[in-house]
Amino acid sequence: MKAAADVSQVAARSPSGQTAAGRLRVRAMTAADLPAVDAIEQDVQPFPWRSGQFAGALDAGYLAWIFTGADPTAPVGYAVLVGVLDEWELLTFAMARSHQGQGLGGEALDILLAHIRGQGGRCLFLEVASANAPALRLYRSRGFRTVGQRRAYYRHADGRTDDAWVIRCDLVPGDSEQDSR
Ligand SMILES: CC(C)(COP(=O)(O)OP(=O)(O)OC[C@H]1O[C@@H](n2cnc3c(N)ncnc32)[C@H](O)[C@@H]1OP(=O)(O)O)[C@@H](O)C(=O)NCCC(=O)NCCS
């Protein structure tokens, strides 16, 4: 995923609530969350955002959410999105390593998709490294399909590169069929 361009985004209400499954709570990210968010990002992301990019996202008014368990002060995951008209982009999304592989990433993504639908959004797209199997498996399970490829988009410290796939989830029935005509 990449840092967002400076675009005027759709205003989005801040959430405050708990998922139907009752395991995740969701709320708006604040400046107080930034150290914890940055620590998770540096730990789990193959190509992490730099410190400061989250603060920039808050300043820009992007939709930035924190997922927690019972303790609302302890982030276990987060997402930053931007919406332009009815198209949304997921700029960064992660679950803490200690909370991965338990279905929570799926719950969090379902919350995001439901919110976007509620805002009248037609699609959510994102870039993901082609080697990021867990993320791809999650996104595919929610109906994302590949719509583009950016060769050698991600560069590892040792010089190796990964392609980025641009993947998209259409939220309005019929949209993906129209694309493939
Ligand atoms: C991607 C991520 C958010 C998924 O969160 P999660 O809580 O582990 O996801 P879930 O437990 O809901 O699992 C979702 C799917 O991924 C699969 N999965 C989880 N960990 C996996 C692993 N290490 N290898 C392969 N598949 C894995 C699960 O089996 C599940 O698929 P299934 O429902 O078919 O069984 C999390 O792995 C993460 O934060 N990764 C690092 C950051 C990242 O890559 N973010 C996305 C960038 S685009």
Image (tube, grey):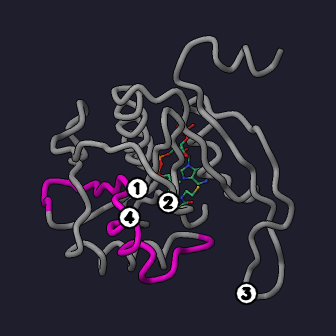
Q: Position of residue 142 (x, y in %)?
A: 55, 31
Q: In this view, does 27 lie above or below 97?
A: above
On residue 92, the disc is 2
Describe the element under mark 3 as helix, strand or loop. Answer: loop
Residue at far front of view: 8
What amino acid is found at the position of numbered circle 2 in the picture? Thr
Of the numbered discs 1 and 4, the one sitting upstream in the chain is 4
Q: Are marks 2 and 1 in contact (CB under 8 Å)?
A: yes
Quarter of the figure with the N terminus? bottom right
Residue at image position (61%, 49%) is 126
Q: Residue at x 39, y 65 (%)?
A: 96
Pointer 1 local density, CA inside 10 Å: few below 14, some 14–19, many at least 20: many
Secondary structure under tag 2 reads strand
Q: Do the residues labelled 2 and 3 touch (CB within 8 Å)?
A: no
Q: Mark 1 points at which residue?
A: 79
**Residue located at (74% from left, 59% from top):** 131
**Badges 4 and 3: C-beta atoms under 8 Å apart?**
no
